[in-house]
Amino acid sequence: MSLGPWQTNNLIIDRSSSRGDVSTRLAAGCPCDDGIRALRWSRVKPTKLYRAIKAYKPRDNEILTLKKGDVVRIEREDNEYKGFAWCESGGKYGWVPLDIIELIDDIRGRLKDDYSSRELAVNLRDVVKGYTIVSGWLWAKKVGTWEEGWVPLNCIKEIES
């Protein structure tokens, strides 16, 4: 039974999967074409809460916002967080998950989906609501605020219900 898309801020949750699970899709701040395409990186129900077990301050990188089909120049892979590459597009740089890059040649790739490299600062004991896990990072929204972005999984722990 299809429940249709559920949208909250910059995330669209597709509940129409035949297996009954919940997939998430980062919409990068704008509505997507069909409103229900979903990333298949890792499924996390949007009701999971996590508590920061240590503070995290985002790297001093500019935010790279990309749309499906954008071409990026791949500079190098991340040594600390495997599965990410340092990419350039339109004069801006940022970390992009390799899972959503379709290689064109040795140094260029095309995005398979929309993406934002925004990182989320957390202080010890902050609570965040998790949406998508990619290569050791969680796309999350800080509870009680509108702040959202990527947080390293080694800085947070799931709150048991």
Image (spheres, rainbow, N blue to C red):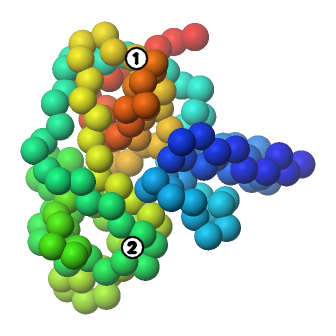
**In front: 31, or 141?**
31
x, y (%) of residue 65?
33, 61
- Residue at 54 percent across and 46 percent down: it is 11
Mark 2 sits on what residue? 111
Instruction: Give x and y (percent) for residue 147.
Output: 37, 32
Dot 1 alpha-carbon crowd within 10 angstroms: few under 14, some 14 to 19, many 20 or more:
many
Is residue 112 found left or right of 23 in the rendered image?
A: left
Amino acid marked by disc 2: Leu
Q: Quadrant of residue 32?
A: bottom right
**Quadrant of the drawing holding the C terminus:** top right
Quadrant assignment, res 54: top left
Specify the farthest residue to the bottom. Answer: 105
Residue wearing tag 1 = 127
Above/below status of 147 relative to 94: above
The one nearer the camera, 91 or 161, is: 91
User: Would you place residue 2 above or below residue 110 in this image?
Assistant: above
